[in-house]
Amino acid sequence: MAANPQNVKQYLHTLADRLPDSATIDEALYHLVLRREIEAGLADSDAGRTTPVEEMMKRRGIVE
């Protein structure tokens, strides 16, 4: 998650406020994992550890 623990705490509070009262632990974990994966993807993108879509399509033989 975010490097700043305060951001994580704020996110958890916001998530708790936005989830319905009937939300399950699995639903809350889904949102936490989703955020973690998005942040990891953004970090990879910022560090240049991605492959352009066009290159992946070419590798898979997909023609536009």
Image (cartoon, rainbow, N blue to C red):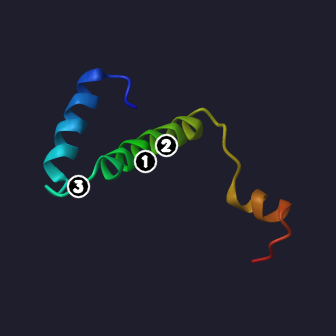
For mark 2, what is the residue? 37
Asked if the residue under mark 2 is in contact with the one under mark 1, i.e. CB atoms within 8 Å, the reply is yes
Left or right: 7 with respect to 60? left
Residue type, mark 3 in image: Ala
Q: Secondary structure at mark 1?
A: helix
Q: Gap in Å between the C-alphas at discs 1 and 2? A: 5 Å
Residue type, mark 1 in image: Leu
Residue found at x 52% / y 35%: 43
Q: Secondary structure at mark 3?
A: loop
Q: Quadrant of residue 58?
A: bottom right
Residue found at x 51% / y 37%: 40
Label 1: few (<14), some (14–19) or many (≥20) C-alpha neighbours in 10 Å:
few
In this picture, is 36 found above or below 59?
Answer: above
Label 3: few (<14), some (14–19) or many (≥20) C-alpha neighbours in 10 Å:
few
For mark 3, what is the residue? 23
Q: Nearer the viewer, mark 3 or mark 1?
A: 3
First in residue order: circle 2 vs circle 3? 3
In this picture, is 38 found above or below 52?
Answer: above
Residue found at x 66% / y 37%: 49
